[in-house]
Image: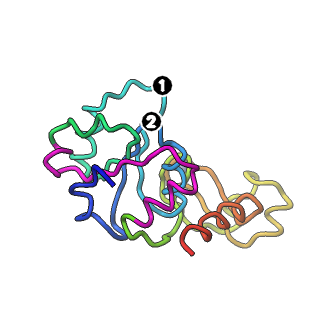
Amino acid sequence: MAGEKGASALRGPSVRFLCDAMLGGLAKWLRAAGYDTYYARQGTNVSDGSLTTKALEEGRVLLTSDGGFLERKPVRDGSVGFLRVPHLPLEEQLRLVVGHFALTRRQSRCMECNGELGVVEPGMVAGRVPRGVIQDQRQFFLCEGCGRVFWHGSHWDRITGRLERVFG
Ligand SMILES: [Zn+2]
């Protein structure tokens, strides 16, 4: 694949990512797989230049569907890791990134805000989740970024199912 210069040095569980505005779906799934992933939200006015600078400063690998980033000096000279992700179904994009960077599945991060999830007791989330859920679940996950509460319900099962298909 073209445009992967520099990226091969950044592999394994400590790799961090920065997705362009076209890859918001992929960003969420990399977070679910446990990878620190910044995503330039669509509609915000972020230039290629400022994204490249952010990737350089924070040591993030740039994932983009846009070859225009190849004209940026830090990408060209390999100081910013870079992978071009083509327009594919989401699961195929995820599979491609996982394979390229030899990723293994880690403790999930918040898919919404990229925050770390801490394990909390049911008593700590009483009043914030439905009563039936409190009775059924022993473990909850609290996002340290946005404060959302997650638990292993049907939505989580769907997420886990997709991750298992990709990570095997
Ligand atoms: Zn969050």
What quarter of the picture does the C terminus occupy?
bottom right
Q: Quadrant of residue 91?
A: bottom right
The residue pinned by badge 2 equals 21
What quarter of the picture does the N terminus occupy?
bottom left
Q: Nearer the viewer, residue 74 or 70?
A: 70
Residue at image position (67%, 67%) is 161
Residues in magenta? 74-99
Q: Residue furthest right?
A: 132
Crowding at mark 1 (Cα within 10 Å: few <14, some 14-19, many 20+): few
Query: At which x and y percent is residue 104?
Result: 45, 72
Query: At which x and y percent is residue 116?
Result: 48, 59
Residue at image position (48%, 49%) is 27
Residue at image position (40%, 46%) is 38
Q: Residue furthest front?
A: 1
Crowding at mark 2 (Cα within 10 Å: few <14, some 14-19, many 20+): many
- In the picture, measured across the screen, residue 106 lies left or right of residue 17, that is right
- In the picture, measured across the screen, residue 8 lies left or right of residue 45, that is left
The residue pinned by badge 1 equals 43
Q: Nearer the viewer, residue 168 or 105?
A: 168
Q: How is the image coloured?
A: rainbow
Q: Quadrant of residue 132?
A: bottom right
Vertical comparison of 52 with 78: above or below:
above
Circle 2: residue type = Ala
